Image (cartoon, helix red, strand yellow):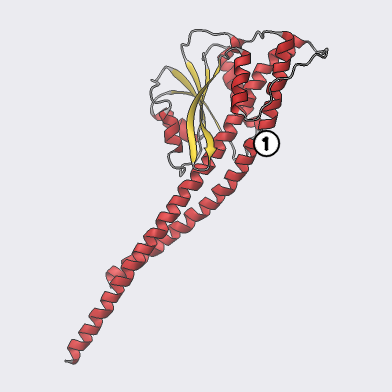
Amino acid sequence: MKGIREIRNRIKSVRSTAQITKAMQLVASSKMKRAQQAAINGQPYAQLLAQLLESLVEKIGAIKHPFFESRPVKKRGILVLSSDKGLSGALNSNLFRMAQDIKPGQAAFVCVGKKASTYFSRLRHEVIAEFPLSDRVHFSEVRSFVEFMEKEFCEGRIDTIEVIYPVFINTLRQEPMLAKLVPFEDFKKQLEKLRMQFEGMQEPVKDAREMTFEPSAREILEAFPSLFLKQEIYQMALSAKASEHSARMVAMKGATDNAENLIGDLTLEYNKARQAAITNEILEIAQAAN
């Protein structure tokens, strides 16, 4: 009977775990759909911004901005978009693998999410800042850490702005990527990359109209690289959140399925043990009667 009691307690424990993982799966599924929709809703603004920039570049010409000035890379600036919580499969470990060849001192890390700051601090990398990011990604949150990196770059403490983040492809597939953003290449090439990123983005239309710029065309155009960088990283943050919730939903679904399979195996084992105990009791009664 002791074996039966242990199996029964084990079934109860596994069933309780399955209920928890099932609930987490449903929550992650709801958040995933919302994050995917937010990523889709942000694309038209990014496309319109890129088209507007292309029209302005055609009229004004080259842009003078610190983001376009190449310089020797003494220290890389890397933004890592990770999660605050685990239980998301190999999502974070795949991200950190993108930086495994970077030695301490070669880069300064800005970490979004506790998993990244814990990992890089443990490896004694230079973590210069840590920022939170809510499930409902707000542009104001992204602006805070992008402006911090812009300041570090313009003051010469870092020589690049790079982003490690998971690219959301579909519910079952998220790929880690290291994107090098600043210094920008030729602005037209940068916009061409954006066009390749967003399917269905229209080719620039020649605009022959005369335009009046206030305060001046040059000042307006030179303010655009910073806005362009914020919008690009904002889209990356949306992709990272969609990837996180998708990975967590898949991981929790796998855990729930494994728990249900284990409950089935334990139930079968319990029934066998119970049947064996009943048979032994019948044999004992029969022997006592004889």
Along the line of sight, the residue nearer the viewer: 207 or 66: 207
Residue kind at label 1, given as amino acid type: Asn
Label 1 Cα neighbours within 10 Å, binned few <14 / some 14-19 / many ≥20:
few
- Residue lying at the far bottom of the rendered structure: 289
Horizontal side, residue 174 vs residue 238: left or right: left
Instruction: Locate the N terminus by quadrant.
Output: bottom left
Q: Secondary structure at mark 1?
A: helix
Along the line of sight, the residue nearer the viewer: 237 or 13: 237
Which percent across, then down, holds residue 192?
61, 20
The mark total stands at 1
The residue positioned 49% from the left and 28% from the top of the image is 177
Which percent across, then down, holds residue 82?
50, 34
Along the line of sight, the residue nearer the viewer: 161 or 262: 262
Q: Which residue is mark 1?
A: 41
Query: In terms of image quadrants, where is residue 189?
Result: top right
Instruction: Locate the C terminus by quadrant.
Output: bottom left
Placement of 148 over or under 37, stated as above or below: above
Query: In terms of image quadrants, where is residue 287?
Result: bottom left
The residue positioned 42% from the left and 59% from the top of the image is 260
The residue positioned 64% from the left and 40% from the top of the image is 37
The residue positioned 42% from the left and 35% from the top of the image is 93
Placement of 82 over or under 17, stated as above or below: above
Which percent across, then down, holds residue 6?
32, 66
Placement of 4 over or under 253, stated as above or below: below
